[in-house]
Amino acid sequence: MTEPAASAFLTDLTARQLLAGYAKGDFSPFDVTVAVLDRIETVQPLVNAFVRLNADEALTQAEASAERWHRKRPQGLLDGVPVSVKDTFRQRGLPTLRGSRTVRTEGEGPANLWDQDAPAVARLREHGAVLVGKTTTPEFGWKGVTDSPLTGVTRNPYDLSRTPGGSSGGSAAAVALGAAPLSIGTDGGGSVRIPASFCGVFGFKPTYGRVPQYPVSPFGTLGHAGPLARDAADAALLLDVIGGPDPRDWSHLPPAAGVSGPLTRDGDGSRGVRGLRIAYSPSLGGQVAVHPEVAAAVRRAVGRLAELGAYVEEADPDLTDPLAAFHTLWAAGAARLLQPLSRKQLALVDPGLREMAAAGARTGAREYVAATEVRAELGRRLGLFHTSYDLLVTPTLPITAFEAGRETPAGSGQRRWTAWTPFTYPFNLTQQPAATVPCGVDGKGLPIGLQLVGARHADEVVLRAAHALYVSGAARIPAPSDSY
């Protein structure tokens, strides 16, 4: 194993720094993978971010990558970079259990889908990434925190008594702790952005279809896939990889031109935002009660965007809270998801998911179609809004991380996770690109996130503005305590 000091150094580096080190011969992908696996062994008993490690295969992949770099013939954009994968993505040779005790560990169905990679995982392999392990998720990714009947409670790196958020909570915790600099997650109502905000890392939900998916999300076209990373430039590099086309997804978009190159050539980042028209909505027109420390941190970061040359004004989108429509669509997906299960299997399911599925089973066709009409109208309003503004900025969440093992904060009187995520799920309905950037910590040292939302297909604009916040220092927050 690597020496402790060297190991800590390697797990602190971004993906781009690792690639630069490989090119110079400062260290090898094998060194880095050993360091990352050591790090996972250290933090896993405390944080519970991983369902399983893939250590033997990861070391084999790392050895092959080291040989390619030695020959100065790297295989792709991420050759030798350790990446974790949320356990909702298929990964060849490993079970995909999705946080559920109802999934058979030996494989599913006559086609045995576990012999196939999901599109994003397939692209990672093609680009030489080292797949170190699969990260935790609530059962079938159904809620905004990460605990499940199968894997128990995942915890926040900044405070082990608190939730990392969800449903990509294991991925966010892993990135925050140096257990691989990159991860891929899914986002059906905020499931990349929520945990990225709570864990102080960067999370990006691209325009729907930008990252192909197979099998399709149980929650239909609400479900996006996207990167979690140390910063926006790393996420853009990962998006360049996982955004490659795949014929198994009939809804995927044409390949986009690479966005990572222009980002990293932009000096101080100001070129990324200069002249942009930015609408800052502190509370969606008074619809959301935001904690004062969250509001203050977001306002400071918005001020930084103005200093970098953006035209910023307070403006609210014409957005009547679409919670009822979202619940209708989400519950219908849950009902379809659980429909094949036997009564015995249903008894093993998270009670909250069972409750939501039961509500979905009572949903009629007319109610479902009415919800899709609400969704279309919301999309029309946001489309018009973005003819006046390039970006919408909001808090990512109105609060910081609360107690682990709960769906809602204690004493809040809230029943469902959507009650405290009013800034995230609307943009799954509209399929817009949205990112969260850390912009400070509260009085307890818990991360606060700022959300950047762009028009559909304006992924590059969102990433440019996020990158500007990083290079200007506005996204710099303390790392989690390394006392463990």
Image (tube, helix red, strand yellow):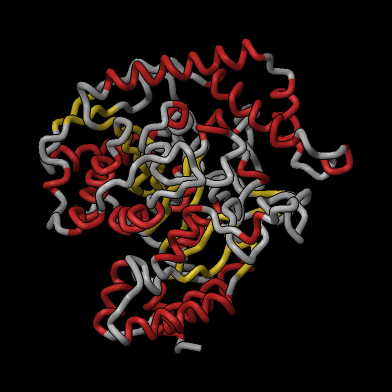
- Determine the image quadrant of residue 134: bottom right
Q: Is residue 293 visible?
A: no
Seen in the picture, residue 476 relative to 17 is either above or below; the reply is above
Residue 279 at least partly seen: yes
> Where's residue 394, x and y in %?
34, 32
Out of 6 and 122, give the one closest to the viewer: 122
Side (left or right) of 314 relative to 222: left
Q: Position of residue 391 (x, y in %)?
A: 25, 32
Res 357 quadrant in image: top right
**For this rendering, which residue is in front, 368 or 46?**
368
Q: Quadrant of the C terminus?
A: bottom right
Residue 439 shown left or right of residue 8 in the figure: left
Q: Residue at x 29, y 46 (%)?
A: 256
Decide which of 88, 191 is in the foreground and name it: 88
Q: Residue at x 49, y 19 (%)?
A: 322
* Position above or below: 61 against 208: below
Task: Count numbered badges in the picture.
Answer: 0
Residue 307 appears left or right of 128: left
Percent across and percent down for residue 473 are 23, 54
Which residue is located at x 60 percent, y 17 percent? 368
